[in-house]
Amino acid sequence: MKRIAATVAALMLTVAGALSMSGCQPADEGEWLKDIYADYFPIGTSYQSGLYDMYDDLLPHFNSMSAEFEMKWTALQPSEGNFSFTAADELLQYAQEHDMRMRGHCLVWYKALPSWVLAEGTTKEQALDRIGDHIYAVMEHYGNSVYCWDVVNEALANAPTQQQVDSGNFYRTGSEATGSECGDWYALCGVDFIKEAFRAADAARDKLGLDVKLYYNDYGLNIPAKREACLKMLRELLDEGIAIDGVGMQGHYYIGDFNMTEFENSVKAFTELGLDVQVTELDVSVYPYGPEKERYETLPESIEAIQANLYGGIFEICRRYSDPWKEGAGEVTGVTLWGLADDFTILDREPIANRKNWPLLFDEEHQPKQAYYAVTDFYSEIVNG
């Protein structure tokens, strides 16, 4: 067993002191999530600059922060060669003031991309050079203040079929890579844009002497066909000696169609490659995936119980794989919630969202939900013998 049993008393004293200073009263006598999971992995949250001071009561639960917008390409380099780090720097400072490390999200994405990057007439060589220049400048600026980067985000097709996986034609391109502030990297560069991004990030890490991990990040990686597509891509990179440290499994999940076995299969498959895994954008919608059918005015207790069961299972698997399950295997090194509480969530703010959702561990009053207890019950069992 991990060191938790030996450190329970110290943790409870630390947390009690923090509570007496803050006046906040989270669940289970005030234990913070980051302390409960101290022997497993960091617990993160997404944040944005407009939320300053809205969540000071909940931030002590977390020890990792992901910038929701401020570190994307369009925010950092809106025009060629002209970088704007102010908003991201302020968010980093805010994280540091709250004893949170910063997770870098993200260096290369098809969205949040200024039009100049892949403007008409851009050659493949120019595009790859722009990737290298952008990555080096950003990593140089942030150095070791960022502990890992999502180097490439969402390069795979939304939902590749098995036929696409078998043919190797499973990358995001065409209509899946168009729209406002979007660019079709694959149409111009093929898979070389992914390889160049990781090569550039590794070269910057080496030249700058950084202790930074490099991740590939995508959603739907718990679905068998997309998992297989990702594994094919990763093996190609690794076979060419391209440095990659881990996989970010975006956790935008839905009740009713989530398969816990396939989630574990993905964690095991990625770690089997020797890569670490982080769940990077975890929320659990209280509605099934697909066209709107249900609408709740308040969160039904029965639905909250289902949501809690999913959260509990996800965290249990992550705890189980927080140590390598075989020699040479990677491990789960972090879980990041995509938000802090149900009063302000991406599922309420998405353009298609026209109904209230409750996808996180804390409710609209910042009180712990059933899901909170589901991910912390194991600790209570240890504390109580």
Image: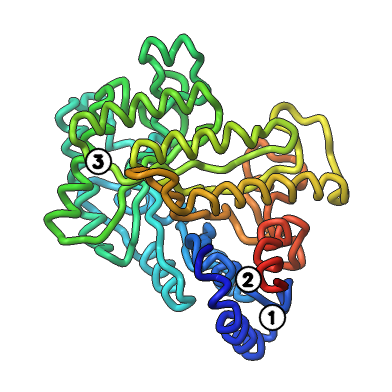
Residue 36 pos. (x, y %): 59, 68
Residue, x 12% and y 56% (percent of image)?
207
Displayed quadrant of residue 289: top right
What residue did someone put label 1 on? Answer: 24
Mark 1: which amino acid?
Cys
Label 2 – label 1 distance at C-alpha: 8 Å
Residue, x 27% and y 65% (percent of image)?
144
What residue did someone put label 3 on? Answer: 198
Q: Which of 97/30 is in front? A: 30
The answer to whether mark 2 and mark 1 are in CB contact below 8 A is yes
Residue 299 pos. (x, y %): 84, 50
Mark 3: which amino acid?
Phe
The answer to whether mark 2 and mark 3 are in CB contact below 8 A is no
Within 10 Å of the Cα at label 1, are there few (<14), some (14-19), or many (20+) other Cα atoms?
some
Within 10 Å of the Cα at label 2, are there few (<14), some (14-19), or many (20+) other Cα atoms?
some
User: Is 266 placed above or below 49 here?
Assistant: above
Whether residue 229 sits left or right of residue 368 in the image: it is: left
Closer to the chain start, of discs 1 and 3, is 1
What residue did someone put label 2 on? Answer: 58
Mark 2: which amino acid?
Leu
Q: Element type at marker 2?
A: loop
The answer to whether mark 1 and mark 3 are in CB contact below 8 A is no
Residue 231 pos. (x, y %): 39, 28
Closer to the chain start, of discs 2 and 1, is 1
Residue, x 57% and y 52% (percent of image)?
338
Q: Element type at marker 3?
A: helix
Label 1 – label 3 distance at C-alpha: 42 Å
Residue, x 50% and y 34% (percent of image)?
266
Q: Element type at marker 1?
A: loop
User: Is 369 placed above or below 57 here?
Assistant: above
Whether residue 278 sits left or right of residue 245 in the image: it is: right
